[in-house]
Image (spheres, helix red, strand yellow):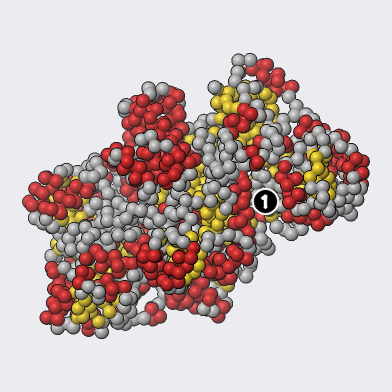
Amino acid sequence: MSKNNKIKKVLVIGSGPIIIGQAAEFDYAGTQACRELKKEGIEVVLINSNPATIMTDKNMADKIYLEPLTVETVKKIIKKEKPDSILPNLGGQTGLNLAMELAESGFLDEYNVCLLGTGREGIKNAEDRQAFKDMMESINEPCIASKVVEDEEDAVEFANKIGFPVIVRPAYTLGGTGGGIAYDEEELREISGSGLRLSRVHQVLIEKCIAGWKEIEYEVMRDSKGTCITICNMENIDPVGVHTGDSIVVAPSQTLSDKEYQMLRTSAIKIISALKIEGGCNVQFALNPNSFEYAVIEVNPRVSRSSALASKATGYPIAKVATKIAIGYTLDEIINQVTGKTYACFEPVLDYVVVKIPKWPFKKFLTASRDLGTQMKATGEVMAIAPNLEMGIMKAIRSLEENLDSLIIPAFKEYSDKEIEEKLSKVDNERFFTVAEALRRGISIDRIHEITTIDKFFIGIAAKIVRMEKELTESKLTVDLLERAKKYGFTDKVIARLNGTTEKVVHNLRKENNIVASYKMVDTCSAEFEAQTPYYYSSYDDDNEAEDTGKKKVMVLGSGPIRIGQGIEFDYCSVHGVWSLKKQGYETIIVNNNPETVSTDFDIADKLYFEPLTPEDVESIVDIEKPYGAIVQFGGQTAIKLTKALSDMGVKILGTAEVDMDRAEDREEFDKALSNCGILRPKGDTIYTVEEAIEVANKLGYPVLVRPSYVLGGQGMAIAYDDKEITEYVNEINEVAQEHPILVDKYVMGREVEVDAICDGEDILIPGIMEHLERAGVHSGDSISVYPTQNVEKQNEKEIIEYTEKIAKELNVIGILNIQFIISEGKVYIIEVNPRSSRTVPYISKVTNLPMIEIATNVILGQKLKDMPYGTGLYKKSDYICVKMPVFSFEKIKNADTSLGPEMKSTGEVLGVSKKYHEAVLKAFIASGANVSTSGNILITVRDKDKPEMLTVAKKFDKIGFKIYATKGTASYLKENGIDAIVVEKIWEGKDSILDLIQSGKLNFVINTPTKGKQSGRDGFKIRRMAVECKIPCFTSLDTVNALYKAIEKETKETDLDVVDITKV
Amino acid sequence: MKGYLVLENGQIFEGEKIGSNKDTACEVVFNTGMAGYIETFTDPSYAGQGIVMTYPLIGNYGIIKQDAESSKIWAKAVFIHDLAEYESNFRTEGTLESFLIENDIPGLKNVNTRKLTKILRDSGTMRGYITTDISNLSKIHGEIEKYRVGDVVEEVTCKQPQKYGEDAEKQVALLDYGYKKNILKSLLKRGVGVTVYPATTTAEEILATNPDGIMLSNGPGDPEDCKFQIENVKKLYDSNVPIFGICLGHQLMGLATGAQTAKLKYGHRGPNHPVKDLETRRVYITSQNHGYYILETSIDPEIAEVSHVNLNDRTVEGLNYKNKNIFTVQFHPEACPGPEDTGYLFDKFIEMI
């Protein structure tokens, strides 16, 4: 069979906002799918609520809907666009679930829309727990003893039968939301209760716990003719018990003999054949480490996070090939892009190893539990490629940007041997580091294995690294030792630190002896065939394969792993930067280490270096490539941090100069720049110690804003109301040694306004001005942002434009910049200038139709705005109103505080687009998953100082018929003011407490404004957590509630909303 | 101790010596398998060759003797990137290095195997010499020049017939040109009895036992060197006994019926070769290990037709013989190491007899 020519118009469903468990990998997969479909001449209709994605770019699809991913909206789009087919298996679980709901309800049949790829039956058999179990039984593939239950009692009965511990897995949820291991009945009741609530079909699976078995995954593909291949297998260093998304994973498997490898491979192929998968599929196995016994854990009948990893690990473009299969091609008809002469129908073989380490958000959530289990908590991941695991692990660690550059966590020094041994039994985010520390303390590999159940092979790798540390500490640094240390992935800095010398000495010794990195190609075939992929990783073997082409090249630094505060937006910017440079005739080089992204696809830049983003790693590339210059302003803080190092190695920083970037960050310089321009800013000062902080704060007057320099996403930022709080916050920041001073500013309350602009040194172009609905104090990334502004006076707008131009020129910005303003009592203040791209660039580019990154790139290369067709100053306002709304992943992170403040907490965002303001807000709320019913019950508990303001909010909801619950104080305040509120008991007051009310499920949402402090013992914290766990929205800012009121007051229904094709905006 | 691989083109690869201390010449080939080094090293088809493992971490699960495909390591030397120090698997009996020593096989670790592979790919399979002393290079090149893989089939084959499952209803004669144990196991698993015959057995001797089927095994070396075997395979062809040939067995049947073989530039050695079954149009991933192949143009269409083709280079991977119960494949349906996807061919053979 070949391409199905009946397919002319395909609807592609994206995966929506970035949340834990569903990150950038689906932008990567979706982008590949869209490009492939377009290449085949198929019209592509795309829906995705996530405006930060590359797949929602105008050149990716013919029709693009940035609309809520709901059944209702997808139906509307199908009715309007009349696609003949739908591609369900590239948009993560969200896309698959939507497609399945439409298929099962008969809607697709009614509108003659064909489901491409794997059939309905196959998807159902893979996704539905019971159906899957039955199917596995019918083909004699072992599953773990388990039972699907629909209520708590059945769960307990079954668990008693098979024996504790048991694992609880809810059906149809992302990243295992709501699952966990229960060791006794009480725990089981708690976990299964929340799991049942979270499951779309109210089912959970109770299964025998096989913690400690090896966890192995296979990425498999199958075509319509039944040809099956495995792309890659992967082994989790963390045995079963830790979600694979939270595990350190290596590829290929390391501890399996061919017998085990083939046993599981054969099983995987048998399973996808039985499911009749057409496309890519992921099969997860548990393998008893002491026998050939195995069990199938789970099958994902779609591309997944693991398939993105497998694609980057092998060079095999899984999403692209899955798309081709979906439109009818068979594997033997698809050319292997890597070799250009062999076919996609083969199995990649690696001549290197790959290490993936998750990136967790724990630094953002100090109260959160760092224990790892079946609930995924990581927001992103890094991957490293190396000739051996030692180097792979070391590279991955430094890619994480966690202030670590080896297996050593300095704080561990403080622990006693006994404490280290105790810590070993804790499954947390530092476990592999603890293993290394235990080895340093002389604890045996056998003992460590006994405690952790980590395979001895992997503990042995840590042992080799620790042995090298010791040798470096105790021996003279000979050329031989240096060379061996480099082959283990030690950087010059680490070698110098251990050896008691300087980085410069090590660097020079290395250069003198020609111990330099050489680059190897990722070619899918272990060099058996000549390959054409410009995809490289470093090694310290000889024979460099990445040659300097002699062309004029520009290096673009990527943004590393997805984390809160630095998400997919920066990958969008990096990729567009590369495309624009290519258009201008430059050869492009991208350096990045995130396997989930589009930028690390080998056909984006002319050359891809999959490497850590540290000065040394980048220098090794620079030594070979000798680029004409580098662009750092697109890759977020990760790239910005490399500016100085790049300048020092003689690479020209294209765009805004290093010295000017520093002026935007350096307190005094920045103050000087602002006063040169006559611009106001909240008063403030820089401090290092608590004493200085208290002095400054009292001089300024509380409240004050405290934050470290050079951070993104407001990490460590807080508003302090008194001496006690500022002491707490400054101490927290100083836990990590600060290279730069801490900033303390007067907290100005007002409306926050944000601008992204491009400056060429003479003129500026502002695509649009955005206004935040939450007042200053809530991080801009966590605020609802509206474009164009709705509440900014003409005069203030004029000032904003004027200030933008002045400060951009003052700072000699060439390229892009982002400015945060506060308007307070009619006056405009600047709070921050970032001479780099920001998280709003993708969405503003889309809604204004201005290719911002392309314009910025051209300006960076020397072109003038005057000579471009876009004009200067403020660009014309769009007819559409766009509301960007943050999306959080609080339910995934146990004990994370959900209250909003100056530190960013959201993981992703959605957009609502409409000509009417209230409709745009409504769409954004729907897309974010909020309850937008126009009647129901709400619970209000606020701190005293918010009560007057709360009253006006309560009145509004009371008027349109909401029933209001409140705690005693709030309730009596409301009653005094004529609102009939139902009193709820506080937590300690007994049975009918607030928590029961929240659990009862009758609340639409909760309003809780947090009291001061970050402790987790308070009632407010418990209320917020309970709301999150019961999937009830909890608003901690009254501004957000007002926005919700605006959205629902006119009682507009989702069915009444028009869908907007943004290619026509 | 430092060790070296001197290639016939003059290039020298440095590494650290592992295994036996002896120096030896060999034909250097590369294998792309990521698991299965035990099966590979003990595969008699590698007799006379030095194996470069392209996957860099070797020895991770130590040595598991029951996974060996024969009684010893037949390769002359092994070249690897990293040798595991902390091997781990529940069946591990010892280290890979101890197994090399036990078999008196030299090897090198810390070799830039990717660079070596690229040279073999670009220049073709070549001879080499493994040693710890490169002070007399002209002597080494003399040894290399002298070296021939030669008549290795007679070296690897068993000396006496061996019987398995004598009580079974159906009996298969397995001609041992250097058979991998899993061919025998694959047959026994399907309930037939098997007698393994030395490669020096005449066709008459075999036919005299009235076997229900004949299996021609894999084996090392240049098929054209197997004059005696080709002559006897021709006689087996003329009998009406169903025959299944694998690898060298496939080539010998081709030569016996008038086809020709040629040497591949650098062979097919690995677990990931796509082979298309021209009848079902399905593609299977196969395990391969061969340096020679049957030339498609030399096949007489009256005698045989191509049943399988390699998707990468379109070489012949299988033949069906016309008006005969005979089929042969170039790849290894017995796997070990490699995918088990084509194990159904043994079923096909069993059904035939």
Q: Which residue is mark 1?
A: B340
Asked whether the viewer can see residue A491, the reply is: no
Residue lying farthest to the top in this orientation = B136
Quarter of the image for residue B298 reads top right
Could you say whether the residue bearing mark 1 is in a helix, strand or loop?
A: loop
Q: At x 59% / y 63%, what residue is drawn?
A: A136
The residue at the point 36 percent across, 35 percent down is A441
Dot 1 amino acid type: Glu
Q: Quadrant of the C terminus of chain A?
A: bottom left
Residue A943's spot in the image, x, y percent? 16, 68
Residue farthest left in this picture: A699
**A596 left or right, relative to B280:** left
Establish if A840 lies above or below A709. below
Residue at 48% x, 65% y is: A161
> Is residue A1000 positioned above or below A403 on the image?
below
Res. A962 in view = yes
- Residue sitting nearer the eye, A339 or A285: A285
Q: Residue at x 31, y 78 (%)?
A: A1002
**A67 or A981, which is in the foreground?**
A981
The image position of residue A283, as x and y in percent, is: 54, 57
Q: Nearer the viewer, residue A27 or A80?
A: A27
Residue A540 point in image, percent of width and height: 48, 32
User: A663 above or below A547?
Assistant: below
The chain carrying label 1 is B
